[in-house]
Image (spheres, rainbow, N blue to C red):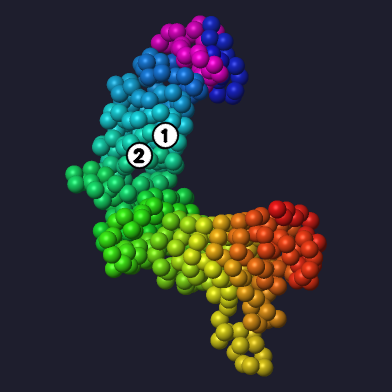
Amino acid sequence: MALFSEDGEAIDEPILNKGSVKIRHLTMVSRRSQRPTVGKDDDLKRLRMLGIEAPHCEPSDLRDVLSKLSCVRVLRIPSQKMNVVPSGSIGKLAHLRYVDFSGCRRLKELPESICDLFYLQTLNISGCWELKKLPKGMGKLVNLRHLYNWNSPGQLSKGMDKLSSLQTLSMLNVGKSRLDINHELLGLGDLQNLNSLQGEFWLHDIKGGMVEVEEAEKAALHSKTGISSLRLEFANENDCSVCSDDEGVMNRMIHRLKVLEALKPHKDLERLEIRRYRGQRFASWIISCRDWLSNVKQLKLWNCEPSLLPPLGTLPSLVDLGIWLMRGVRSVGEEFLGIEESHLASSSSHPAFVALFPKLKTLTFRYLFEWETWANPKHDNNVQAMPSLSKLVIDHCGKLKSLPRFFAVAPIKELQIIGCPLIQGSIRDGCEEQYNWVSNIPSVEIK
């Protein structure tokens, strides 16, 4: 067992036990199967911060250590073996402000006594994969500002809708809340009062029914102006197993569209990711992205159903764009660039000039298995497409026949073409002049 003070200096346990050393910040590190132990009660009672980095820390070990604390403000215990937090011990640490259980993969539950920590401001349970739900009394933590729960499937309790000062809520799993007949779980509609949310926010397991439409409207994401990054992940539903006829399938697709419409974010959003959306087309705020997503810098569409891509070329701030697993896409044309015939050809003799994807630096297409054509703009002499592009990735789009001509003048520094035999063959054979520009790219990977 190694002990470290707040400045990172190693401390011998015998020196700590002398009692003359006043330690305020202590980290206990065990690299093997050692268990965290410190001798006298006086050794720990003055501590303000305690970190226990011991992969084999057992609940009994933690109970022994916590029982010796009285003034601790910060507690960090990223143990992969711990599956339960001692109830009585942690509930008595009245001065706790910050608790970090991140990475406790086997942790199954948190004790209800953690809700007695009146001054608690930050709780980190990210990576607690087996945590099923949080305590019912979470609404009592009126000073809680930050709940970090990335990749933690635990259901949040209903009372948390009262935490109007909550600034960080990494993710909300709403899939089971619709089956919550006892109204014990925080649902999508309960977000309506959490208007102080900031930073990254992930809505997970969104269903596509009438109930979700109403809940999504109540959530009022557009009013949460502090959210900078939003991930909307729909449930992995099989319509054929849920609906018995075509009309039922169509109704579910319509409901999903209405849900996505209602989940419209505010106009200052910087990052947006949409996953597993099974509607026939995108919501109006995505199709009219120039008006609603003008500040978005990063956008990812993953495993979505629509066959037409939105006019993303009109986004003035977009830097990074990724499109994955959109099996319905067979053709990409001027609609993707955002070209409007009325704008380009204001008169037949003097068509207007337009810059599209003006700040885009990275463009990635992966696993568009049915994609066949990427059309050149009709007025390509009057289009400056992707003038800032530095990296282009086309990965496993096996039916794609060719790339558009505007890449010949794009400042590409890195090109990856993987699993695209039709394009690969043309480039390697050098039989098409349209790919002469590839030889000028510093980094090229074709396989």
Q: Which amino acid does label 1 sit on?
A: Cys
Question: Residue at 66% of width from left, 55% of height from top?
Answer: 418
Residue 342 lies in quadrant: bottom right
**How many marks can you see?**
2
* Residue sticking out furthest to the left: 182
Picture layout, residue 2 above or below residue 210: above
Which label number is shown at residue 338? none
Residue 318 spot, x, y in % from top left: 58, 63
Residue 381 in sight here: yes
Residue 185 lies in quadrant: top left
Question: Residue at 53% of width from left, 72% of height from top?
Answer: 311
Residue 301 spot, x, y in % from top left: 50, 59
Q: To which residue does mark 1 refer? A: 128
Question: Residue at 65% of width from left, 76% of height from top?
Answer: 376
Q: Does the magenta stretch include residue 267?
A: no
Give left or right: position of 265 versus 242. Answer: right
Camera-nearest residue between 89 and 187:
187
Please give the range of residues in magenta.
15-43
Element under disc 2 = loop
Element under disc 1 = loop
Which label number is shown at residue 154? 2
Picture layout, residue 169 above or below residue 247: above
Residue 402 spot, x, y in % from top left: 67, 68
